[in-house]
Image (spheres, grey):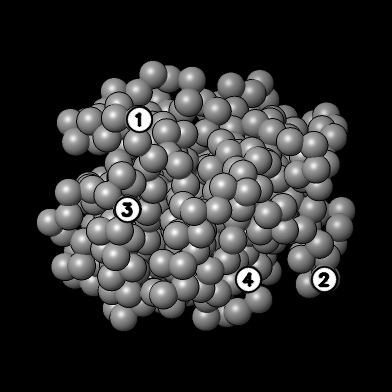
Amino acid sequence: MTVRAMSIYGTRPEAIKLAPVVNALRAEPGIQSRTVVTGQHREMLDQVNRVFGIVPDHDLDVFGKGQSLNRLMAKVLEGLDGVLAEVKPDVVVVQGDTTTVTAAAIAAFNRGIRVVHVEAGLRSGDLQSPFPEEANRRLASQVTSLHLAPTTSARDNLVLENVDPASIVVTGNTVIDALHLALEAPVSWTSPEVARVAAAGRPVLLVTTHRRENWGAAMSGFGRALRRIALDHPDLDIIIPTHRNQLVRDALWPHVAGIDSILLTEPMDYGEFVHLIDRSWAVLTDSGGIQEEAPALGKPVLVMRDNTERPEAVEAGVCRLIGTDEHQVEAEVRRLLTDSDHYRQMARGVSPYGDGKAAARIVAAIKAMFGQGERLPEFDSAWMAKTR
């Protein structure tokens, strides 16, 4: 029996985390693999596909400037229904917690197609934070047949929600697979300014912020905190690859523009971004995936949120939740700058999220679901956190 697998994704983070799976599916005998992109993120999505050599079989191109989440959901559902009816896959593979994920899972379920959810079981415990991601991943879980949890904590979350343990596999996170692949390739900096900073040898604070619940006052506060830090520590370079959303730029840029040691850039190619994490001294973020990538490279991560669906690195002491108050953000960065023992404790290179073999476990689990072979031994995130 040939298993017809369809991978569906629409944003840059999904593309990064599904790329190792897509390529592993395509290389696997007995699997006919097709990919569908929704285009929820347009330019950033296309760039990641190029990095990993993926040419989608179908492109729904649903991106629309300023469109509501409901409009986006409706466009993905409508576009996917026709593709599912035409291709008739045996299984649909989705990743994470975006609007694309929820729409694709529901569309597949409505057509009687089994859903495989990569990075299943992440929970913050607050339906409004992150918004709408927390709701998206919970909704997807309700119609999923095979839950691919990245860590034992994520598995435990699912079990507490009465998900059948037999339908859960702990695989590790595919972001570590992608990270290893990207770091193997030499970097060629697109921006001369980034190349200059990367070569200067000074400490680099990498900053990313885009979270919807931080738009407005909180994000403006981040900007003010960074300005004060930069003026007091001119030997620290700060690089801020800025999300294309104009609300993000309007809140952040007025406070940090014009300072010599702060470099504002456009969103970076994934390969360059990974090498920049590797080059950085520390990371300040409200994003999700970088909480997984940076600890694997020994970079302390300060998370500008009140909660996180990725608690493993916090528990290991290499990520720290610092909230969104600008003075607290400032204090935590200054502590890393001035307390060498604290910095060393957070820069231990702990990788509780993966060992680079998640895609192989995922392919084996999908085949086993159709009676082809056995699942591989699961990833032990607790063991990784203790031994790195």
State the residue in front, 1 or 204: 204
Q: Quadrant of the C terminus?
A: top right
Residues packed near mark 3 inside 10 Å, few (<14), some (14 to 19) or many (20 plus): few
Which residue position is annotated with label 2? 160
Q: Amino acid at mark 4?
A: Ser
Q: Quadrant of the N terminus?
A: top right
Which residue position is annotated with label 4? 124
State the residue in front, 9 or 382: 382
Residues packed near mark 4 inside 10 Å, few (<14), some (14 to 19) or many (20 plus): some
State the residue in front, 165 or 90: 165
Residue 2, quarter of the rendered image? top right
Disc nearer the start of the sequence (1/2): 2
CA gap, disc 1 to disc 2?
47 Å
Numbered label attached to residue 233: 3
Disc nearer the start of the sequence (1/3): 1
**Residue 60 seen in the figure:** no
CA gap, disc 4 to disc 3?
34 Å
Which residue position is annotated with label 1? 201
Q: Cβ–Cβ below 8 Å for labels 1 and 4?
A: no
CA gap, disc 1 to disc 4?
37 Å
Disc nearer the start of the sequence (1/4): 4
Residues packed near mark 1 inside 10 Å, few (<14), some (14 to 19) or many (20 plus): few
Q: Is residue 216 left or right of residue 303?
A: left
Q: Is residue 177 left or right of residue 37?
A: right
Label 2 SS: helix
Query: Which residue is drawn at the image coordinates 72% and 58% (left, top)?
Result: 315
CA gap, disc 1 to disc 3?
15 Å
Label 1 SS: loop
Query: Which residue is drawn at the image coordinates 46% and 34% (left, top)?
Result: 278
CA gap, disc 2 to disc 3?
46 Å
Closer to the eye: label 1 or 4: 1
State the residue in front, 299 or 45: 299
